[in-house]
Amino acid sequence: MATRLKDTDVVVIGLGAAGGVAVLPLAQAGLEVIGLEAGGAMTRRDFAPDEIRNNVRGWPMLSSHKTNQEAPTVRATASANAVQGGHPMMNAIGGTSLHYWAQHWRLNPWDFKVKSETTRRYGASRLPKGSTVEDWPFGYDEIEAYYDKIEYELGVSGQAGNVNGKIDPRGNPFEGPRTRDYPMPPLRWTAFHDKMAAAAKSLGWNPFPGPAAINSRSYQNRSGCGYHGYCNTGGCHVDAKNSTAVTTIPRAQATGHFKAVTGATVTQINVDSQGRASGVTYLANGEEFFQPAKAVLVAGFTYENSRLLLLSKSAAFPKGLANNHGQVGRHYFSHHQGAPVTALFPFDLKAWYGLPAQGVAVDNFADDNWDHSKVDFIGGSNLWAMSDRRPISASGMNTFGMAPNWGSQWKAFIKENADRVHSSYIQKTTLPYEDNFLDLDPVVKDPLGLPVIRITAEYKENERKIAEHSQEQMEKWYRAAGAIQIAKAPTGGIMGASTHAYGGTRMGDNPDTNVVNRWGMSHEVPNLGVLGASVMGTSGARNPTHTVQALAWRTADHIVKNWKSIAL
Amino acid sequence: MSELKIFSRRDLLRGAGAVGTAALAGTTGAPSTADAAVAAAEPQAAVNASATLTREAFENLTAVEADLLEGIVERLIPSDATGPGAKEARAAHYIDRALGGALASSKPAYTAGLAALDRYAQSSRGKRFLELPDRDKDSLLMDCEGGQATGFTGSSAQFFGMVLGHTRQGMFGDPYYGGNANFVGWDLIGYPGVRTMVTATDQRSLEAGQMKPNHRSAYDFETFNKATAKDDSHDGDHSAHTGDLAHGD
């Protein structure tokens, strides 16, 4: 029998990138907030520059007991066998925002209106077959103020390209208008970044430094970035990476209205006889607790969100909470961020230090930034030339057919070339499709006996064509910068468990095709909200976290403003 | 079982004083500080090594397995004109130690694979692996790499890929884990070393070819909590063959 705890106003499940943001506006408004986090707390002392631990052995990503036990199973299609593999989730105060790359992009205006803009410009026949893409229930203008808030409250560095409609050629000329500059200048460039920017310009493109939730100088009494080279899958040893663990969560705690409970694995969201959320059941130290609440916010990773709703079955919701329309798990997609191009240069890049969020971006081929009349796909890619090199990963470099993989010849090859190789990061428009979805695995269960989530998804023709097109552009860019060898990865098949996982609880006005409404609240359960990329219906060609956090703040604002009607 | 707590060299030298260093000095021609620390961590091992003066104790592999693994890693990353190789980096010791901790799930694959490799040497070349000339060792390893070597559980390519991945970790990983002795791996590829802050001036100095290598382990910096085997033993090795776990964030 679960121990019933004292009532609270709002319970937030998961204190990562999304939940860790929402608790601040809720607590600042004076609501009593409890955050349940399956992991523990980590500090800068835990974040040693250690490639073996961070990258090879998957720490801290894989130090999460809860998520390790519920890694998704994956299959490309419904006729294939689903196999359990790795996962990108992390349980801790701050969640994956502790060790993510912290590229902090706003989506571009087109990303909110893929369906209507494609139809308007090229005709409805150009929408990929089988895609369930919809316009967002609002446009870029609606979310701009929340993007701005996140940039200033957490700290984002970058170079504005469009301030109130005025284009600044140092920034991204294709971005949506922003009301003011970033609070910090962009992360610095190296000589190699300068070279790549010059090469892009020589092709007539518009290179610019990307935005990062990383301090380029001291901000809010936290240090500027140390550029030490262990940012990829590593936490920050000087608190320059603006995870929720060092920004919004401590500020929420300081209000006196927010309490974080660590080591809490939520197993069920409970409902009352009216079909409203009444609180959550969780396990901690082997004991079961019930935390009653007037409102519940689900704020786990995309896989955890759909899974928890599907597991929370009741008489009112026999197929899972908020799932009477059968939409939980639908419209799932993993961002197409693979299929890189790798280049070999005839000179050292001096790239041993730096971070993946430091680099040169090109948006000329992203979104609908160019005329798609003569190509047979929609959307596009953001090209990104960054800094990310560590010794073990460098030793695994592509040898471009110029050397074997071991022995003296290989050793001589990597001695010469370990610092001469560069791999691009290309994020591509990825769409939802009818037959890509999440559901509960019928066989594989966690140690509690609860089914894990099953991913059934593959990249379709549109994503693969974008991948091909982006690889051609990337090769041009590398060649213009002096590359002597080029290797291209395959353009994509199965959608595996991803760091950029979207959908499952999509946001939209139509309850027949969406789980949450335009405010992030369930269509079916009025006091249940969902935070995270699981509500996003399009990916854009850039990292999701900034949008996730802007939406989280916006949902929290909505709850505060409508507390009387939501709490009843 | 030493894998329950991995000591930093600094911890060990502080705790063990000069005894470990002295014990080890007798065992190899050119001991590194890392060598000394490892020996000092295991007083019994140090005594044994000191007594026999022939070989260091391995922690998890048998003497036969250890010799064979040493023979393999020596061919994968040889000591040659470009500098010291995996033997000098103590890559086999890195693997041996990890097999009692983070890579424990790979232990059966090593035991079975090493035995299979030696049987295959006998059946295909008429000699045990270590008795073969380097050329034949290499051609045999190529058989394994290509999956043509027989007698393995599963594919010989799988075993080869695992050993190669771990050997690279032992060559290029942080010396804290027992490999990359004397930073030979980092020096080979020109990695200028672990630093906690790289200023714009430092970057310019690197670009001008004037940055001096920093020969320090991450855990030589007092600011960091030490990694323990418990931290990294959840599910063994996720990326020996593929590099980093996930692309992108």
Image (spheres, coloured by chain):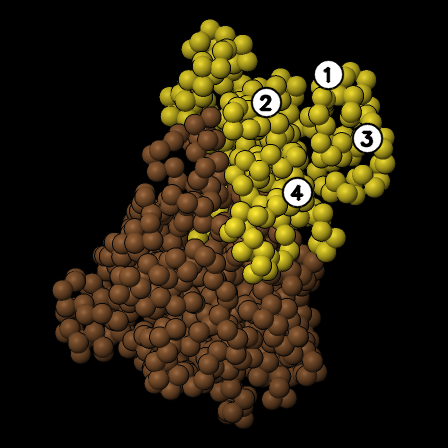
Residue A532 seen by the camera: no
Q: How far is the residue under mark 4 from the one under mark 1?
A: 29 Å
Q: How far is the residue under mark 3 from the one under mark 4?
A: 21 Å
Q: Is residue A43 above or below residue A150?
A: above
Badge 1: chain ID = B
Residue receiving disc 1: B54
Q: Are marks 2 and 4 in contact (CB under 8 Å)?
A: no
Q: Which mark is residue B215?
A: 4
Q: Are marks 2 and 4 on the same chain?
A: yes
Q: Is residue B198 above or below residue A269?
A: above
Tell me the kind of residue under disc 1.
Thr
> Which lettered chain is shown in brown?
A
Residue receiving disc 3: B20
The secondary element bearing badge 3 is classed as: helix
Q: How far is the residue under mark 2 from the one under mark 3?
A: 23 Å
Give the residue displayed 54% in from the left and 62% down from the top.
A96
Comes first in the chain, label 3 or label 1: 3
Tell me the kind of residue under disc 2.
Glu
Q: Which mark's residue is nearer the viewer, 3 or 4? A: 4
Q: Which mark's residue is nearer the viewer, 2 or 4? A: 4
Location of residue B10 by image quarter = top right
Q: Position of residue B95 (x, y in %)?
A: 60, 32
Residue A347 seen by the camera: yes
Asked whether A266 or B97 is in front, the reply is B97
Q: Are marks 3 and 4 on the same chain?
A: yes
Residue receiving disc 2: B70
Q: Position of residue A143 (x, y in %)?
A: 41, 82
Residue closest to the far top: B126
Badge 4: chain ID = B
Q: Are marks 2 and 3 on the same chain?
A: yes
Comes first in the chain, label 3 or label 4: 3
